[in-house]
Structure formats: structure tokens, C-alpha cells
């Protein structure tokens, strides 16, 4: 099997194939944030997509390619932490295809209900690994198995998010930021930027608690968790990247890891500044943005992919009770948490440590908050 990156032109073909079925989601920016940070940051808001996330792009492209080949199946099975399942249900409904989706029990209720709304048969499992195993068992029974990210068609479809954003921008940003779960979005983004904006850096974001992709790239071999990692960024709770997406990950310009309280912080701030819903799996990119900006001496123009917004309202309610907005992003580039993989002087490191302690104090003020946020997706 050829696992090398496919031609970048496949993303353009995918975009032409799927665009009639989807919204053209907007590019937005925050003048307040740009002023505070001293840089221009543009956000592609895929949370306003029909299914609330980018995953439907890959599913649609995959199905439409099968249709063009006269191989459209009559029943499909997949597993997901939510957004892929929603995309499967929506796209399959368009073509009258029966869909079965295995979801771990702790999948967000918002994502569960969306998959059901679009007509998917939802079956719950105790763990993500069990969901994956059940889906593969159904494949042996005649279902067409659609992996969340491990196919050229799905990767090219996912890449249309970045492709579309670069077309809308009309210029090459200094860097593009995308989060990494299974690796489909960031793999497709690599193809898109190679086609339209080859001079742009591509930077990945991943939770420190779910750092299988980072470890895979670091050690040059695929790392797999035995159990789903514990992170508020539920869309990034993958066990491992695939051999296919691993080849793309090796081509990234940089990878940054985010701690949980940093993800909480930016989930609150992006919602406040952009006035749109941002999943933690998307807001994590701002941790990478801040760490990247610490290494830059000139003003930057950056593109951030907001890949989804299917987040439980109860989670937001708890976030607003805390004091994240009391710590302004204005000081982040100079004296916040020291950038991972970057050198800083002792004084800056001490200031960063103090601000880190302040954020941790906010998290711990309610001793049950962290566990609540991690568990609030449970059915």
C-alpha cells in the first residue's frame, strides 16, 4: 500500500467535488486580540459548518469518490469520539446509505444527539478501543468501514478546510496552525499549503495528555496509547495516528504541546473574542500560536483552523464561572508560560512561572472543576 503523501492537486479536486454540499465558512479576526499580541491572526471558523465540524469534508469526499467509481456502498460503519460520526451520519443520509456508528460512552451528548439527528444508528461502547474493534467486526459482516482519517480520500477532503481558508485569505500567512488527533486534518492541510502557499509553515497542536503524535514524530515510530487519554480536547483523544498520516506528520515544521489549563483558558478567551463557539480541540491552537510568537522578532500573519464547535453548553457554563478572562492575552508573548522547545532568560521564566501558577490556582479554586470538565461529556 502506498502511504506516501498524495498529489496536492487532490485537495483542489476534493474541494470542487464537495463544495455544493457544504457552507463556505468564514474567516474572522479579532482586532482586540491582534492589538494585544501585536500580530495579525485569522481564524477559519468551521464550527459554523452544517455538522459543526470539519470531519464531514473527508467523509463527503470519500463517498463521492466511491460514487464516481460506481462503488457506493449500501451500508457504512465507523467509530468516533463524535465529529466523524456526525459527518458519517449527515453524508450517508444525503445518499440514502445506512450508517452504524460506534461511540464511546463518554462522548459529548451534543455529538451523540447530532449523530442521531442525522439518522445514524448509534451504538455505545465502554472504550474507544472497543468502538474501533466493533466497527472492524462489522466490516467482516459486509459493512463498508470508513476510518476517521486513514485514507487518501478522507485526508484530501479534510484538507479542503485549509485550502478554502487560503483561498479566502488571498495571501500566504507566515504559519498555519492545526490540531492533531488522528492526523487527517493536519495531513490534508499539508497538501493544501503545498498547493497554494508552500512558503507557509505548518504547525501542529496536541494536548500534553494526549501526545501520541508528538511522541511518534519524536521517536520516528508510531506510539499507541493503551487507553483513551484524559483531556478536555475530546476530539483529540485518539489512541494513535495511522501509518498514512504519520508520513505527513514527519513533514510538519513544528509541534507544540498544551497543558489542560491552557486549553481551558483559550476556549474561554476565543469564545469571548470571536463570538463563535470553539471546541477545546480547536482552541488548543492558540497555545501553539503563543509559543510560536515567542520565537518571532517581526510581526506575523497567522492562520488558525477552528476545526469544530460541538461542545456541551454545560462545559461553557462551568468555564464562565472561573476567572480565565481576568488574565489578559496581552502579556502572553513576553512573560507567560515559557515556550516549549524555546530558550528564555531566567527573569522571563520566573514571570512565566508566576502567571502559570495564577492560572493553575484558578483551575484548582474549585477542586472539582477539572474532573467535572473532563467528565461532563459523559451521557
Image: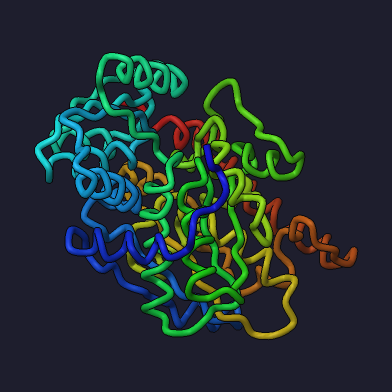
Say if 170 sits above or below 102 in the image: below
- Looking at the image, which residue sits at the far left? 96
In which quarter of the view is residue 131 placed?
top left
Please give the name of the residue rendered at 36% of the width and 78% of the height, measured from the top-left corner: 168
| Left or right of residue 172: residue 168 | left
Q: Quadrant of the C terminus?
A: top left
Please give the name of the residue rendered at 47% of the width and 80% of the height, measured from the top-left corner: 32
Q: In front: 167, or 82?
A: 167
| Left or right of residue 223: residue 353 | right
Q: Is residue 271 visible?
A: no
Q: In front: 76, or 339?
A: 76
Percent x, y of residue 236 = 49, 41
Q: How many marks?
A: 0
Q: Is residue 124 visible?
A: yes
Say if 141 sits above or below 38 in the image: above
In which quarter of the view is residue 272 placed?
bottom left
Say if 98 sits above or below 353 in the image: above
Percent x, y of residue 150 = 45, 39
- Looking at the image, which residue sits at the far right? 346
Query: How is this picture coloured?
Result: rainbow
In which quarter of the view is residue 27 placed?
bottom left
Say if 316 sits above or below 295 in the image: above
Percent x, y of residue 158 = 39, 54
Percent x, y of residue 368 = 51, 32
Please give the name of the residue rendered at 43% of the width and 65% of the height, measured from the top-left corner: 9
Amino acid at each position: 500500500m502506498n502511504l506516501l503523501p498524495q498529489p496536492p492537486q487532490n485537495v483542489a479536486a476534493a474541494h470542487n467535488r464537495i463544495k455544493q454540499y457544504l457552507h463556505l465558512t468564514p474567516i474572522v479576526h479579532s482586532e482586540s486580540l491582534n492589538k494585544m499580541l501585536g500580530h495579525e491572526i485569522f481564524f477559519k471558523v468551521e464550527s459554523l459548518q452544517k455538522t459543526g465540524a470539519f470531519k464531514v469534508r473527508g467523509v463527503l469526499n470519500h463517498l463521492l469518490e466511491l460514487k464516481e467509481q460506481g462503488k457506493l456502498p449500501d451500508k457504512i460503519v465507523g467509530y468516533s469520539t463524535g465529529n466523524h460520526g456526525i459527518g458519517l451520519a449527515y453524508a450517508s443520509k444525503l445518499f440514502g446509505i445506512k450508517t452504524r456508528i460506534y461511540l464511546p460512552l463518554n462522548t459529548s451528548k451534543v455529538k451523540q444527539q447530532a449523530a442521531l439527528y442525522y439518522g445514524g444508528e448509534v451504538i455505545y461502547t465502554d472504550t474507544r478501543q472497543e468502538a474501533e474493534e466493533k466497527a472492524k467486526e462489522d466490516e467482516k459482516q459486509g459493512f463498508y468501514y470508513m476510518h476517521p482519517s486513514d485514507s487518501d480520500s478522507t485526508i484530501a477532503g479534510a484538507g479542503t478546510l485549509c485550502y478554502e481558508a487560503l483561498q479566502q485569505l488571498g495571501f500566504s500567512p507566515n504559519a498555519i496552525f492545526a490540531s492533531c488527533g488522528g492526523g487527517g486534518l493536519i495531513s490534508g492541510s499539508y497538501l493544501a499549503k503545498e498547493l497554494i502557499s508552500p512558503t507557509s509553515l505548518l504547525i501542529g497542536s496536541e494536548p500534553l495528555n494526549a501526545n501520541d503524535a508528538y511522541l511518534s514524530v519524536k521517536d520516528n515510530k508510531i506510539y499507541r496509547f493503551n487507553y483513551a487519554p484524559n483531556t478536555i480536547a475530546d476530539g483529540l483523544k485518539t489512541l494513535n495516528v495511522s501509518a498514512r498520516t504519520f508520513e505527513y506528520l514527519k513533514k510538519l515544521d513544528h509541534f507544540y504541546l498544551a497543558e489542560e489549563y491552557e486549553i481551558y483558558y483559550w476556549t474561554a478567551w476565543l469564545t469571548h473574542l470571536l463570538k463563535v463557539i470553539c471546541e477545546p480541540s480547536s482552541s488548543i491552537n492558540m497555545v501553539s500560536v503563543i509559543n510560536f510568537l515567542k520565537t518571532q522578532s517581526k510581526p506575523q500573519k497567522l492562520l488558525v483552523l477552528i476545526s469544530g464547535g460541538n461542545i456541551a453548553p454545560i462545559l461553557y457554563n462551568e468555564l464562565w464561572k472561573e476567572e480565565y478572562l481576568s488574565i489578559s492575552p496581552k502579556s502572553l508573548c513576553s512573560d507567560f508560560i515559557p515556550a516549549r522547545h524555546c530558550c528564555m532568560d531566567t527573569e522571563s521564566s520566573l514571570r512565566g512561572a508566576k502567571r502559570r501558577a495564577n492560572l493553575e490556582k484558578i483551575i484548582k479554586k474549585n477542586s472539582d472543576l477539572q474532573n467535572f470538565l473532563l467528565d461532563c461529556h459523559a451521557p
